[in-house]
Amino acid sequence: MRSLDATDARILLALDSDPDATVVALAERLSMSRNTVQARLRRMRESGSLGAYSRRVEPAALGYPLMAFMTLSLSQREGDLAAQQIVRIPEVVEILATTGDGDLLVRIVAKDTADLYRITNLVVASAGVVRTSTSIVLHEVAPHSVDGLLRRHTTDARH
Amino acid sequence: MRSLDATDARILLALDSDPDATVVALAERLSMSRNTVQARLRRMRESGSLGAYSRRVEPAALGYPLMAFMTLSLSQREGDLAAQQIVRIPEVVEILATTGDGDLLVRIVAKDTADLYRITNLVVASAGVVRTSTSIVLHEVAPHSVDGLLRRHTTDARH
DNA sequence: TTGCTTCCTGAGCGGTTTGCCCAGGAGAAT
DNA sequence: ATTCTCCTGGGCAAACCGCTCAGGAAGCAA
């Protein structure tokens, strides 16, 4: 994975405010050569600095307006099994192994509360899960965004 | 926000496996008319079904390989203040109001453990924060992805 | 200083894609 | 039957893309 510099960050910020701008438009707006923008974008793509396109898809637009987090405690023996089973549930959109209260932090989306109930039961019933705790997301105070980081990066002379 | 159907999901899945495919290439691959793909993409963009472009940026590529979650309990009076202050910290990439143990779930990224320590202190010191709990992400078992949801959507005749 | 490397720039080229238009037809709903 | 929506196939000019090349600026090492 390539480490992004200030120029990359500027390009990404410009793309953020107009995700469908052409390379020519970006170059003009950022006062760079078209070649530069093109080369940077290609490098960012190929080096894996950009994640999957579907990260941009809003689950709500797919009919899943509800979001929740489950904290799971796993048994030492069957811990790996749990992750393997849970990964297969489509409504589970993210699984993280963490320190602290639980062993696994799981993000799920659901169509409605009944659906959420069904999914949490699925997760709880997975092998190796010994304790769970569910938090429903009431409001996205600040949706996921790295804008602040990008903006800071643009002013940095170097890391 | 427009509700996506099976055709939209198919387009998004194709984009996922080749994020830089042209509209013509997508149309050919999906056996659709170019006009259809073009119209769908435009509608998805304009209806807000797609989030910001920078959601695709890997924080690690920006120099922030560490990720952590903080659960915050807020005082009833100054709860709003806390969110306003915390939102300004660039390393805070997501803030969610939740039910359960805490009132706020905060996702942060950091350059290293020392940096993480600094940021958590910043958050803890915010007005209205009465109790915190931090979990460091050890491993991304399953990075954020709605692929499963998209795939299911393609087989649905309708919701 | 000299050389080496890396990166940005401006220019050019052909082939492709885009955005837009239109007319026709299939399917669902009224 | 009529209306509405959507997909399709065709066509057009303009714009863009991917690629190449030569020149120059900046950084680094010897």
Image (cartoon, coloured by chain):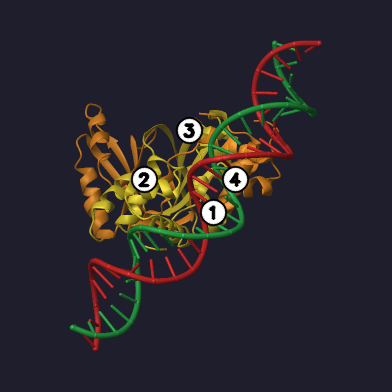
Chain colours: A yellow, B orange, C green, D red
Dot 3 and dot 4 within a common chain: yes
Question: As drawn, is D17 to the left or to the right of C29?
Answer: left
Q: Chain letter of disc 1? A: A
Q: Is residue B153 visible?
A: no
Q: Where is mark 4, residue-wise? A: B23
Q: Nearer the viewer, mark 3 or mark 2?
A: 2
Q: CA distance from mark 2 to mark 1?
A: 38 Å
Q: In the image, which disc is placed on residue A14? A: 2
Question: As drawn, is B100 to the left or to the right of B83?
Answer: right
Front residue of this view, candidates A102 and A91: A91
Q: Nearer the viewer, mark 3 or mark 1?
A: 3
Dot 2 and dot 4 within a common chain: no
- Residue B80: image quadrant is top left
Q: Secondary structure at mark 4?
A: helix
Marks 1,4: beta carbons within 8 A: no
Front residue of this view, candidates A83 and B82: B82
Q: The residue under label 3 is which amino acid type?
A: Gly
Q: Chain letter of disc 2? A: A
Q: In the image, which disc is placed on residue B48? A: 3
Screen quadrant of the C terminus of chain A: bottom left
Q: The residue under label 4 is which amino acid type?
A: Val
Residue located 41% across and 40% down the image: A18
Q: CA distance from mark 3 to mark 1?
A: 32 Å
Q: Chain letter of disc 4? A: B
Q: CA distance from mark 1 to mark 4?
A: 37 Å
Q: Secondary structure at mark 2?
A: helix
Q: Where is mark 1, residue-wise? A: A83
Q: The residue under label 1 is which amino acid type?
A: Ala
Q: CA distance from mark 3 to mark 4?
A: 19 Å
Screen quadrant of the N terminus of chain A: bottom left
